[in-house]
Amino acid sequence: MDKRYPWEQAAAVLPEPLRAGLRGLGSDRLSELEEMRLRRGFPMTALLPEGEVDTDTPPIGEEELRQVLENATQSSAHTALDRVRQGFVTLRGGHRVGLCGSVVRRDGGIVTLRELSSLSIRVARPVVGQAGALLPQLREGGAFVSTLILAPPGAGKTTLLRELVRGLSDGEGGAPLRVGVADERGEIAALWRGEPQLYVGRHTDVLDGCSKAEGLSMLIRGMNPQVVAVDEITDPGDVRAVTEAAGCGAALLATAHGGGPEDLCRRPVYRALLSAGVFRRLVVLERRDGRRTARVEALP
């Protein structure tokens, strides 16, 4: 595994002058670094618990943005842009580079970005200890019940999902469970040459690079999981996939975007989940005064 600190892994795609400016924040602040933001015409900023702060770097230009993308994809920026229709690139270690710029559309769909205007490099890091406090609330009669994690972007859904997978797999507070992870974007376990870069437990099996529906189907057919986990339910196809998986006897662990429980009733995709009765517990993540909190609610 990569022995560097998470922020160092993520910052490795930056040109050296930008890395030098980042190091100027000091090790204590960098240990809490959440994102690096590169916007054309402005110095790079660092997202910390208290908000975005400027770094001692010159204004970002086209060359810096293209260099980061080339480093992230290990290919030319022109070639790489044809591979970023989803708006992000996943890095080794589970870090993610989000992209904005001028969209090129063809036949009604996005095919590439013609020019880059800004990048966001999100730092992935394990947060050990959350599982121990939450898992007892996610069990009935000692058995883990299907659970949905709900939070707005950047609140730590994927981090908490990974920690709960680890806790279930390693038997924290109960017997170890076989967990299958359909890691569509490579952010949960961050496989690198078959080895997870982010620890997800010793009884966990991971498929990445495939859709949720494909991954869940392959895991259930081939690995006999007791729990299956996916990140970010976003569309009706995802709902169908997790509903079908629930019918196969495995408990589910998933995340979804939302500001609170009311979003489950307001948005059609999540109303379908409620109607299907797939999940029994809801974990709501919130961020207040720079700190993340989690509360558990029962679902009917």
Image (cartoon, rainbow, N blue to C red):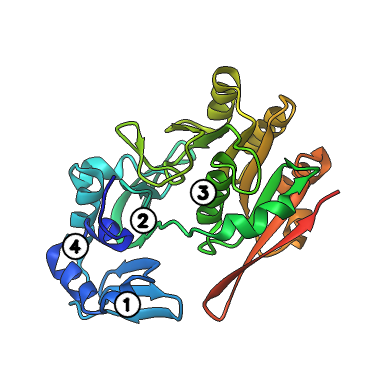
Q: Measuring 39% from the left and 71% from the top, which residue is drawn there?
A: 32
Q: Amino acid at mark 3?
A: Arg
Residue that label 4 marks? 64
Q: Nearer the viewer, residue 273 or 228?
A: 228
Which of the labelled discs sits on residue 162, or is there none?
Answer: 3
Find out whether the residues at labels 1 and 2 contact each other: C-beta distance under 8 Å: no
Q: Secondary structure at mark 2?
A: strand
What's the CA distance linking mark 3 and mark 1? Answer: 24 Å
Q: Is residue 267 visible?
A: no
Q: Amino acid at mark 1?
A: Asp
Which of the labelled discs sits on residue 99, or is there none?
Answer: 2
Would residue 143 appear left or right of 164 to someone viewing this image? right
Q: Secondary structure at mark 3?
A: helix
What's the CA distance linking mark 4 and mark 1? Answer: 26 Å
Q: Secondary structure at mark 4?
A: helix
Which of the labelled discs sits on residue 119, or is there none?
Answer: none
Foreground tag (3 vs 4)? 3
Few, some or many C-alpha atoms within 10 Å of disc 4 (few <14, some 14-19, many ≥20)? some
Of label 3 and label 4, which has the lower sequence position?
A: 4
Q: Amino acid at mark 4?
A: Glu
